[in-house]
Amino acid sequence: MFLLTIALFLVNSTFVNGINTNFALGKPTTSSSNTGGSGRCVDGNRDTNLFSGSCWESSGGDMQPFWMVDLEANYFLSHVTITNRGDCCAERLHDLKIEVFVEDPVQFPTTLSFLCAMYEGPMPTGATENISCSCLTRGRYLRIEGLNRVNDQDRHTMCEVETFGTNANHCFTSTMRRIEGTRFDGDLYPVDVTSTVECANVCFHNSTCFGFNFNHDSLLCELRVGSAQALAVSGWSYFVWERCI
């Protein structure tokens, strides 16, 4: 058994990869309901006029609307770019839940989800905004749900959705980044160790571990093994594996 040496680097922000390939462009899409076709969101056209034929919206009365794209391969997603409608009704793009799945959640409803981000909104009229994903959001299927519909005409509306990141076949190194003052809350597995190096060693040998929380006062170690949300918490740090690129 070899001795694993792990370098821990202090940073104050989430790593965002600078690769500019839009993985969603032209890929298969589906939605809970639609007016005009869900494929309009990945046609490469950011035209914000619904009547120009490049925007999608859910049907009236759909109170649990979602839009989804099959990226046709697994990716680590750094951020999602969404363009809102500009000719009217911009307030409809609000309360978004952006998730990524390895398997199709429509066919396999119990498949594990990885939360990219929650977006409160509403997004300004005709705006294009970048929404950063939490660390190591990975999968093949990107789903954007419209939560908290105000009434049966509060339609989930988007004109373009773009996804960016790296191919999930890239390897990991034995280097980790430390995000100070952050704890991820969600699918966690506590481990009885008393140092960051020991915690990292356990995470490294656990195929389901994406990173870990460590409390520097109580010496608590928590492995992140699924979907989780970043919280600002004093005394904690979140450690995430670097990727080979």
Image (cartoon, rainbow, N blue to C red):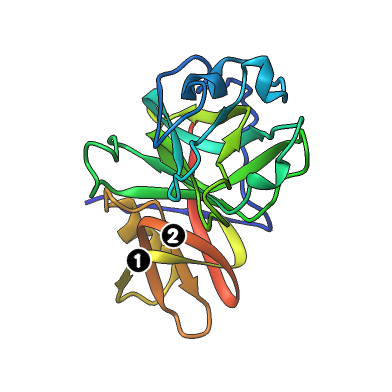
Q: Quadrant of residue 181?
A: bottom right
Q: Is residue 210 left or right of residue 177?
A: left
Q: Is residue 175 visible?
A: no
Image coordinates of residue 4 in percent, x first then y, are 36, 52
Dot 1 falls on a residue whose secondary structure is: strand
- Measure how far apart labels 2 and 1 are at the Cα level: 8 Å
Dot 2 falls on a residue whose secondary structure is: strand
Q: Are marks 2 and 1 in contact (CB under 8 Å)?
A: yes
- Residue sitting nearer the eye, 24 or 45: 45
Q: Quadrant of residue 151?
A: bottom right
For disc 2, the marked residue is 228
Closer to the observer: label 2 or label 1? 2
For disc 1, the marked residue is 188
* Amino acid at the residue labelled 1: Leu
Q: Is residue 137 left or right of residue 237?
A: left
Q: Is residue 82 above or below residue 203?
A: above
- Residue sitting nearer the eye, 103 or 188: 103
Question: At 66% from the left edge and 24% from the top edge, which residue is drawn?
Answer: 50
